[in-house]
Amino acid sequence: MTYYPIKLFYSIQDDGFIAIIPDLPGTSAFGKTQENAIREINIVKELWIETARKEGTKIPEPSPIEFNINKDNKYSGTVYIRTPKSLHKQLVEKAKAEGVSLNQLCIYLLSKNLGISVSKD
């Protein structure tokens, strides 16, 4: 299976999520939840590739995924993650118990796991 970067947007007008695959022109899918939109865009992707093969159309290679690095190849310091609801709850409860923000707790746990100290830069 080939993995293509997916862009996901919330549409106020449609009251749901729209997913696209920029590397595959014309691909678009809708879902009431993010998970549904991603599931649907993966179906669209497979159909797009299947049709391109039948028609002899060149199938583009996936673009490299940008990991929040700007045009100067400098890290932005921003990371977005999705967690299971149960883990999110545990993290929030732990942060409250420690008297820190969820962000601070996650930075601490990640740096501790990597065995590094974190600067504010």
Image (spheres, helix red, strand yellow):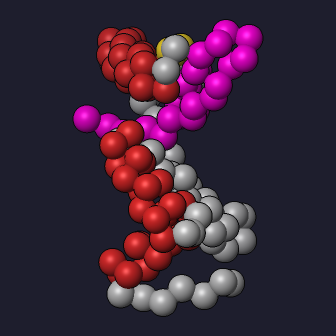
The segment highlighted magenta reads 1-23
Quadrant containing the C terminus is: bottom right
Find out whether residue 103 is within the magenta segment. no
- For the point 58% across and 20% down, the residue is 18
Q: x, y percentage for residue 10? A: 65, 25
Taking depth in this image into account, of 43 and 16 the one nearest to the observer is: 16
Q: In the rendered image, which quarter is residue 62 located in? A: top left
Is there any visible trace of residue 65 in the rendered image?
Answer: yes
- For the point 56% across and 69% down, the residue is 100
Q: x, y percentage for residue 78? A: 62, 62
Q: x, y percentage for residue 36? A: 42, 19
- For the point 54% across and 85% down, the residue is 118
Taking depth in this image into account, of 107 and 55 the one nearest to the observer is: 107
Q: Please say if 109 is above or below 27.
A: below
Q: Please say if 66 is above or below 34.
A: below
Q: Please say if 77 is above or below 23.
A: below
